[in-house]
C-alpha cells in the first residue's frame, strides 16, 4: 500500500481535536466534584440589590440570595464562600472560576445562555422604569428626549435598549447604588431597575415621590453556573425542587419580598 503523508497528518489532527474535546468535556464536569472535594461552595452575590443581597448593620451580606446560597451549601454539606460582584462582573466570575454559582438577581436570556448555563428559577423578579409622580409617562414613546439611568450590563440595560426611542438619553452607571444615587440627585429623570431594588429605594426616599411607570420585562431570577456543568446543575435543581415542594422556597420569598415565590419557570 502506498503511504499518504497527508492522510496521516489529517488523521493526527482529527485525533488531537477529538482528545481535546474529550478533555474539555471531562474538565467541564468537575465543578460539583471540586466543591465536594474542597467542601467549599463559592457563590457570587451582589451587595447593592436589597432585599436580594445587601450589607446589614453588622456589615455582613444578607438577603434572599444569601439565604439561598447558604441553603444550597447546607444541602450539599459544604461551607459557603460569598464572592461579592457587581452586575457587570457576575458572568465573568463564572468564566474565570472565581465562583461556582452566581446567585445575584440573574435573569435568563438567549445571549447569556451562549456563555453560561442556568438552573431552574428560584425567586420572582421584574424590571421596570420608575420616576416621579409629577412626570406623566404612559408609553415608552413618552420617554423621548428624557434621561433614564440604568446599571451597565444589567437586564434593565438590555431591555431598555430594545424599546426606548432613539432620543432617550440613557445614562449608564457601574452598580445599582450609583444608578439610584444619580436618580436621587437629579442627574436623571427616570430610572430603570429591578422591582425590589426600586421598591427599597422608594421606601428609603419618600421625598422623591416616585412610582412604577413602565414594565420592561417579567424576569424571574435563575442561578447561573459554568457552561457544561450538568452534574452541578442537576444537583442544584434537585435542591430547588425539594425546597419548592417543602414550601421553603415560598418561605424565603415571603421573608424578603412579602409574597410567595409562586409558580416559577424551569
Image (spheres, rainbow, N blue to C red):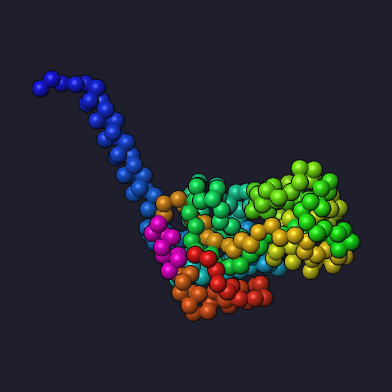
| Furthest residue in direction bottom, as rendered | 246
Residue 148 location, x and y as percent? 78, 50
Q: Residue at x 69, y 47 (%)?
A: 161
* Quarter placement of the N terminus: top left
By secondary structure, the bulk of the magenta-drawn segment is best described as: helix
Residue 198 location, x and y as percent? 74, 63
Residue 76 location, x and y as percent? 43, 68
- Residue 206 lies, with reference to residue 108, above or below; the image says below
| Furthest residue in direction left, as rendered | 1
- Residue 256 lies, with reference to residue 184, above or below; the image says below
Q: Residue at x 43, y 69 (%)?
A: 238
Q: Residue at x 24, y 22 (%)?
A: 6
- Residue 9 lies, with reference to residue 240, above or below; the image says above
Residue 221 location, x and y as percent? 58, 62
Between 116 and 50, the one nearer to me in the picture = 116
User: In the image, is 134 to the left or to the right of 193?
Assistant: right
Q: Is residue 207 in view from this perspective?
A: yes
Q: Is residue 195 magenta?
A: no
- Residue range in magenta is 230-238
Q: How many marks?
A: 0
Q: Residue at x 15, y 21 (%)?
A: 3
User: In the image, is 189 to the left or to the right of 95?
Assistant: right
Q: Is residue 44 in view from this perspective?
A: no
Q: Is residue 236 magenta?
A: yes
Quarter of image, res 136: bottom right
Amino acid at each position: 500500500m502506498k503511504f499518504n503523508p497527508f492522510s496521516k497528518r489529517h488523521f493526527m489532527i482529527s485525533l488531537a481535536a477529538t482528545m481535546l474535546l474529550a478533555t474539555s468535556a471531562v474538565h467541564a464536569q468537575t465543578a460539583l466534584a471540586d466543591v465536594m472535594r474542597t467542601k467549599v461552595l463559592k457563590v457570587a452575590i451582589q451587595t447593592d440589590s436589597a432585599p436580594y443581597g445587601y450589607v446589614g448593620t453588622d456589615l455582613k451580606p444578607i438577603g434572599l440570595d444569601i439565604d439561598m446560597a447558604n441553603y444550597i451549601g447546607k444541602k450539599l454539606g459544604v461551607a459557603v464562600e460569598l464572592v461579592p460582584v457587581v452586575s457587570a462582573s457576575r458572568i465573568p466570575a463564572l468564566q474565570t472560576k472565581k465562583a461556582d454559582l452566581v446567585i445575584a438577581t440573574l435573569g435568563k436570556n438567549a445571549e447569556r445562555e451562549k456563555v453560561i448555563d442556568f438552573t431552574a428559577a428560584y425567586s420572582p423578579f421584574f424590571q421596570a422604569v420608575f420616576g416621579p409622580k409629577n412626570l406623566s409617562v404612559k408609553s415608552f414613546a413618552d420617554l423621548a428626549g428624557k434621561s433614564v439611568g440604568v446599571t451597565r450590563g444589567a437586564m434593565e440595560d438590555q431591555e431598555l435598549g430594545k424599546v426606548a426611542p432613539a432620543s432617550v438619553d440613557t445614562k449608564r452607571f457601574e452598580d445599582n447604588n450609583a444608578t439610584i444615587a444619580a436618580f436621587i440627585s437629579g442627574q436623571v429623570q427616570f430610572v430603570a431597575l429591578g422591582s425590589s431594588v426600586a421598591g427599597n429605594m422608594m421606601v428609603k426616599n419618600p421625598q422623591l415621590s416616585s412610582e412604577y411607570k413602565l414594565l420592561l420585562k417579567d424576569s424571574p431570577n435563575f442561578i447561573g453556573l459554568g457552561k457544561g456543568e450538568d452534574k452541578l446543575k442537576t444537583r442544584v435543581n434537585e435542591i430547588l425542587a425539594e425546597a419548592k415542594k417543602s414550601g421553603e422556597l415560598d418561605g424565603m420569598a415571603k421573608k424578603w419580598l412579602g409574597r410567595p415565590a409562586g409558580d416559577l419557570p424551569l
